[in-house]
Amino acid sequence: MPPSGALPRQLSHLPEADQVRLALSSKIIEIAQIRRRFGYRRIHDLLRPEFSGVNHKRMYHLYTEANLTVRRCREAKRPPADRVPLQLAKSINNGTECGFSIVRPQTASSNWWS
């Protein structure tokens, strides 16, 4: 296997754009195998200094072309909460009191705020 960053000799005849694409694709796969929780956006941020002419859309295209996905954490299964049955109201509008009285300026005395 060639050293990191170098292309194999069989690929030296490809046009420069294809070489860059192949090098970028291999770097994406290499980083994704090391850092399994890195998505294409984070890999793009890591490779931006090396491949400055590649935007996030190309990175997404190569990332999905390589059949890579971020492994999602499974949610922990929690036991169901104990259900408390609703209590029946003892009278009409029972339990809907606000705990404070509403004062309307039209019906209040002149010093209702003091």
Image (cartoon, rainbow, N blue to C red):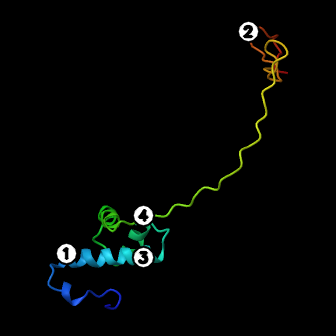
Label 2 vs label 1, nearer the camera = 1
Q: Which mark is residue 94?
A: none
Q: Specify the amino acid type for callout 3.
A: Ile
Q: Indicate which disc, 2 or 1, sits on the residue closer to the N terminus.
A: 1
In what element is the residue under mark 4?
Answer: loop
In what element is the residue under mark 2?
Answer: loop
Crowd rating for badge 3 (residues with CA inside 10 Å; few <14, some 14–19, many 20+): some
At 44% from the left edge and 68% from the top edge, which residue is drawn? 42
Q: Specify the amino acid type for callout 4.
A: Thr
Q: Indicate which disc, 4 or 1, sits on the residue closer to the N terminus.
A: 1
Q: Position of residue 111 (x, y in %)?
A: 83, 15
Q: Position of residue 51 (x, y in %)?
A: 31, 75
Q: Indicate which disc, 1 or 3, sits on the residue closer to the N terminus.
A: 1
Label 1 vs label 3, nearer the camera = 3
Label 3 vs label 2, nearer the camera = 3
* Residue 103 position by quadrant: top right
Q: Would you say the residues marked 3 and 2 are in contact, meaning their CB atoms lie under 8 Å apart?
A: no
Q: Which residue is mark 3?
A: 31
Q: In the figure, 5 relative to 41: above or below?
A: below
Q: Position of residue 5 (x, y in %)?
A: 32, 86
Q: Indicate which disc, 4 or 3, sits on the residue closer to the N terminus.
A: 3
At 79% from the left edge and 34% from the top edge, which residue is drawn? 84
At 33% from the left edge and 66% from the top edge, which residue is drawn? 59
